Amino acid sequence: MLHHPPTAAASARVVAPKKRGSYNCGRCGLPKKGHVCPSADGGSASLHLPRSGHRLRRALSFDEDRPSSSPAPALEDEDEGVTEAAVLVTVGEPEVVVEEGGEEEDDDEAGWDGEGSLPSSCMVEILRRLSPKELMRAAAVCRGWKECVRKVWRSAEELRLRVSPRSQIGFVGSVLHKCAGLTRLTLTMESDVDATMLACVAFSLPNLEAFEINMAENVVNRITGDELGRFVAEKRCLSTLKVEGCTNIGFLSISSSSLSTLWLSDLYCISKMVFKCPNLRELSLDFTRKENDSTDLITMMECLGRTCPRLRNIHVASIHLSNEAVLSLTSANLRDLRMLSLVLGSRITDAAVTAIVSCCTSLELLDLSGSSITDSGIRIICNVFPETLSRLLLALCPNITSNGVQFAAVQLPLLQLIDCGMSICDTDYQNESAEENVYPNNERSGEYTKCQKSSTMKSQRIYQKLIIKHGTLRKLSLWGCSGLDTLYLNCPELNDLNLNSCTNLHPERLLLQCPNLKNVHASGCQDMLIGAIRNQVLNEFAAAVKDHLPCKRLADGSKRVQVPHFVQQLSDDEKQKRKRMTQCIVHHD
């Protein structure tokens, strides 16, 4: 057979078909053929005839009332200073949130008839603000709208996807295929997840930079350590990885030159953990609260210093933390550490504090909640970090007293946050409650003896008082401090105070001199204490709001009188400042 050269008709079929315009006039709606539009010479709007057809009504369907859904608000990232529009997209049960960047679009017209249509850039801006159901419907209006919806997906930079139990892996793949330029992905799994999901993400998103997997309740994460390490090694651009429910990790080896943030939670019985990430800056390891956890924390801490020399933030939560594990970490000589959080380590004592201060001299945040340090350990901390430490968290530390907290407030002038919840507790009351649960007494004579004994013990209890005067403190948390009965605060910058479950705090021994206070949490407190808090806060603000009229003596010096209102005039700035000072909320049951 002879091969003939392609004809002109055949070559024309290869070229993309040209978009046809409308056969009617875009101004008056009459046929264009042999037509002179009367509105071309600046005719009035009353001469315009309405266009026929239902496409106009379909195109303007976003103006109709939509009580079932509403557009998603704009998301703002205060830390980076970037503001991006958010579009919520739902396909079936799963939920998708897409954040798009400000890419420039072509100014091609997109609409229903090609005449008098909005530019595609304007259409994309409108579609970005539609609700999930409407955005999917908009893609079915016409070819131009479908192309605009496709541009919305292509320009997406961040996607938050909720995968329901009824969804299959094919749904996730179809959604990710539309967002080939995606850089940040968050998956909230409501069904079990395995390595198939990792393979789908790795294949669909070559430029992924941040990946997060959140697990719902009663959902199992079946991803192993080998599969997770292989995923990280293949993603050369990955900088942030956060995974929940890592109970089946087993052996973990992560090697990456681009990874800077790594969060792993629910870790359990890790046989070996190796990190070869020279640019890792932030590491968070949260272990399960099980006594039979066989993870070797000492060996893990030793490897961190050698393989991750640029670590700045470390968070480790485990009930098996001890002084030996802390010494292994400090032997790595991590001089760049700015945040150190070692939580729930009841075997961490003042010896570990000494090792920490000898290695890390520039800490800005120190969290030793759940440890067994004493007031001596707090003094060691204050002597080393007076110029850098701004946040100190010592919750669930039963061996510290109000004296140690007061010392920290005096010696650390840059403090902005203090958390000592459940640290200053009434131990006698707890022991008494435990004895009542172990030895119940049901006899009447025994009840009389118990009441007499409890009244004697209550009279013999020694409560503590806390006096804090600080110029930069913004948040103070005293939740569950049942050992406090006196509290005096003079903190002009304090805006959040947590007094939840402070059951023994006396209303007459409470003094709050905090003019910028905005939130006071008093759940579980006595009614009289709540009333005293409200009274003091309102009195403080009422005294600040009302006009202070100066007093002046008469000429004969007999008595003092107030100067009339017209003598003293307040400026607009002072009036606005006094209005802002009245915004304080007391949260209680």
Image (spheres, rainbow, N blue to C red):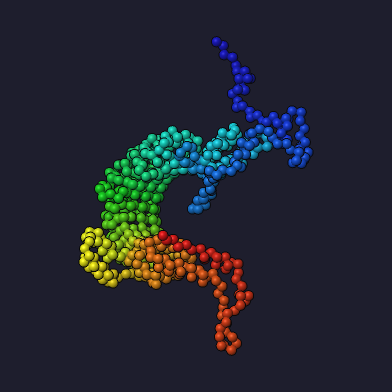
Instruction: Check the image and name the residue furthest to the bottom.
Output: 556
Please provide percent x and percent y for residue 119. Answer: 63, 39
Work out which residue is located at the far top of the displayed protein and give it: 1
Q: Position of residue 371 (x, y in %)?
A: 30, 58
The answer to whether 321 is drawn above or below residue 580 in the figure is above
Q: Residue at x 59, y 43 (%)?
A: 65
Q: Between 74 and 158, which is closer to the camera in this rendering?
A: 74
- Location of the N terminus by quadrant is top right
Q: Is residue 78 left or right of 279 when viewed as pictured?
A: right
Q: Residue at x 34, y 39 (%)?
A: 222
At x 65%, y 29%, the residue is: 20
Residue 395 position, x and y percent, is 34, 60
Q: Is residue 345 left or right of residue 109?
A: left
Image location (x, y in percent) of residue 543 = 51, 71
Q: Quadrant of the C terminus?
A: bottom left
In this picture, residue 452 sits left or right of residue 365: left
Residue sitting nearer the eye, 435 or 427: 435
Residue 563 in the image: above or below residue 317: below
Farthest-out residue, front: 444
Q: Foreground: 37 or 259?
A: 37
Which of the 4 quarters of the picture holds residue 36? top right
Q: At 48% across and 68% down in the image, what residue appears?
A: 538
Total numbered labels placed on residues in the image: 0
